Image (tube, helix red, strand yellow):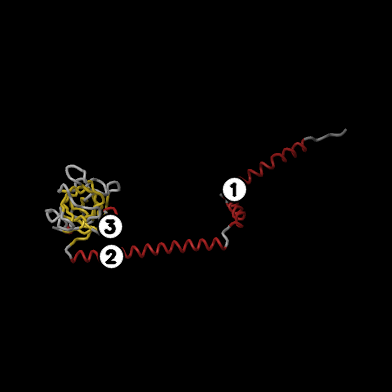
Amino acid sequence: MRVQFWGAPIRLRFLRRITPWVFIGVSLFAVRLSKGVVFSDVYSLMIRPFWPGSAQKEWLQRSIQTEQYARLQLLIEDNQRLRSLLSLEKSALSKGLISAAVISRRSTGWWQQLELGKGSLNGISEGDIVIGPGGLLGRIGSVTPTTSRVLLLTAPSSRVAVWIPRNKHHGMLIGRGTNRPQLTFVDRTPKVLPGDLVSTSPASTLMPPNIPVGVIQSIDFSALPSPNAVIQLIAAPHAIDWVQVKTR
């Protein structure tokens, strides 16, 4: 009598079915333990043929050289700017002016005021004249012991008496809350032209005379009660880092 054992073939088939899954599980477990190091090595070997060659290496070196050259140029320009500021401060001291750094400005209202890094301890007082590279910026509106606030010509509350030196026509420079103030003439028929220089008036009791302010950009002769003009300031408040304060 022959006895057939079916258990062994069943176990073999079962082992054959679960072997791939066991292999996959062990592999995933090994990857988890190694934190993907094996995959990283395999990936590195696969992309090695695509690594930068000699031409790409030259491109990278040129890019690095260009960046270094740009940085050098910026350092040179910054050095020249600091040197000019130093000479400006020495010149200001010799003329009785106080040089002060702009330490703060409103990002949404830079045409209204600036904050300076010097105050009453440095001899600055309210009403002093503030001059930037090119011309008049405004007056000191308020002072603390170590800081001072500049009321710019472009501020809505600013009023400065000015004139046109070419023909002696007087007017009032009024801030409009924009980067270009308005000049309202006293004369009903001013003989002025776009491009005429505007400076502080000798009749002003707040400003020294003949400080450059700006140039006439456009004129409205039909405005009432008198003609007015839009003025382009020579000294740009948004682009100034240092100013000079003329004490009274």
Q: Earlier in the sequence, mark 2 or mark 3?
A: 2
Is residue 65 visible in the rendered structure shown here?
yes
**In this picture, residue 129 sits left or right of residue 11:** left
Q: Earlier in the sequence, mark 2 or mark 1?
A: 1
Residue for badge 1: 31
Residue at 18%, 55% (x, y): give it.
164
Is residue 126 visible in the rendered structure shown here?
no
Q: CA distance from mark 2 to mark 3?
A: 12 Å
> Residue 91 in the image: x percent, y percent?
21, 66
Q: Earlier in the sequence, mark 1 or mark 3?
A: 1
Mark 2 touching mark 1, by CB under 8 A? no
Question: Helix, strand, or loop for circle 1?
Answer: helix
Task: Classify mark 1: residues with Cα within 10 Å, few (<14), some (14-19) or many (20+).
Answer: some
Q: What amino acid does circle 1 point to?
A: Val
Between disc 2 and disc 1, the foreground one is 2
> Residue 197 in the image: x percent, y percent?
22, 56
Between disc 1 and disc 3, the foreground one is 3
Residue for badge 2: 84
Residue for badge 3: 241
